Amino acid sequence: MLHYECYKGKDERKLDTETCAKVVQRNKNLGLEEYRFLLRTMASSGIGEETYGPINVLEGREDSPTLLDAHSEMDEIIFDTIDKIFLKTKGFLSPSDIDILIVNVSLFAPSPSLTSRVINRYKMREDIKSFNLSGLGCSASVISIDIVQRMFATHENKVALVISTETMGPHWYCGKDRSMMLSNCLFRAGGSSVLLTNAARFKNRALMKLVTVVRAHVGSDDEAYSCCMQIEDKEGHPGFLLTKYLKKAAARALTKNLAVLLPRVLPVKELVRYAIVRAFKRRTTPKGETASSGIGLNLKTGLEHFCIHPGGRAIIEGVGKSLGLTEFDIEPARMALHRFGNTSSGGLWYVLGYMEAKNRLKKGHKILMMSMGAGFESNNCVWEVLKDLDGKNVWEDSIDQYPDLSKVPNPFVEKYDWINDETMSFVRV
């Protein structure tokens, strides 16, 4: 990895409490119970006041998005991060040096493709290998890294650019189905661009080295397949459905993934210890009882940092608990969720940026990146840090406020808790 950049919107793009309240109030399909549900969800979401929203939603046009809205949103995020990439690499790398280009946006697949839009903007070479991925959800960035790794295996001295984002504006849910309202509460505008290479001439400039990538897909199970799906509700409002089976599907996919990945990165001594302890517990656990939950492995024996996809507070805390991680370990994901929200496939890089901004990443450290996405998939990878990292990034103007800022009481409760007053049940809202 030579460099990475994350998108940070302008101040006028921020979805603070007042702006979110205006968006909610514009939805005439909502009743009192829906208002109460939204209040509970936002109060417990772990999302702060400075996340970014799409322009058509901020302008009050969420129920009538246009193709121009989708293109404008993508242009702003994609071109902003790419411009910053080439600014940082000016002098040793230019757009004409890109051999492989991958763009992943799940919900927007225009013609010409978004890769063609990037190629045209930066006047890239005619022999560039381009891939436009859609429908892969929040874990598409790691999938793209896997594709690059496989391309590098048969193509020497190449440079790849991976762009990961999502289009939010045209897919803002305007109905009242609670399972579909969740996406509005969690997802925000954001994205990233990552520069990768296997060219020996860039070895001394590299930030990290890819150790391994493992992908697991449990889509053969019907419940896992349908727990995270783009559909229309009963009234015909399009949106993104998140079901209660999501947590179970995520756990199943992650378990299958780590069963392959961890033996590659943990020392043999820890694997042997785990096998002995597990065998002992099986013998000593009374019939009818289950052994204690948790992974049982000490991941710190081979990994220093854990880059968890900031999909939501429940996901972050659930993964942390199951893997035996500390509050320090899950802090980067929790802070990325608070500051930027769930930015889909670009989210992992905000988490990585937090670690770098806090000067946590030192030479030789290994980072486990864990992502989950619709399908249902778990795609994880491990990076090794090649030099002490302390570069300026998207966190530059806010890192000093964290983690303290995340402990401030959620303003939704303070301003709108009156909705929970029982007397409101007799009032038509």
Image (cartoon, rainbow, N blue to C red):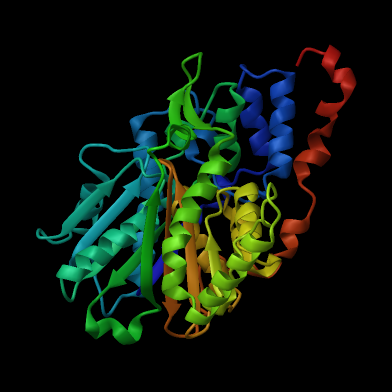
Which quadrant of the view contains residue 136? top left
Q: Position of residue 92 (x, y in %)?
A: 26, 79
Q: Residue at x 20, y 70 (%)?
A: 153
Q: Residue at x 18, y 76 (%)?
A: 157
Question: Is residue 186 positioned above or below 202 on the image?
Answer: above
Q: Residue at x 54, y 39 (%)?
A: 246
* Quadrant of the drawing holding the C terminus: top right
Q: How many numbered marks have been drawn onto this rendered protein structure?
A: 0
Question: Is residue 316 positioned above or below 389 on the image?
Answer: above
- Give the side of residue 425 with respect to residue 7, left or right: right
Which quadrant of the view contains residue 28? top right
Between residue 79 and residue 426, name the one nearer to us: 426
Between residue 51 and residue 325, name the one nearer to us: 325
* Quadrant of the drawing holding the N terminus: bottom left
Q: Position of residue 406 (x, y in %)?
A: 72, 57
User: Residue furthest toward the left?
Assistant: 127
Q: Position of residue 226 (x, y in %)?
A: 45, 32
- Give the side of residue 417 with respect to residue 183, left or right: right
Which quadrant of the view contains residue 29? top right
Q: Evaluate whether residue 97 shows in this view.
A: no
Q: Position of residue 407 (x, y in %)?
A: 77, 57
Q: Evaluate whether residue 271 shows in this view.
A: yes
Question: Is residue 24 positioned above or below 122 on the image?
Answer: above
- Give the side of residue 144 with respect to residue 390, left or right: left
Q: Residue at x 22, y 79 (%)?
A: 199
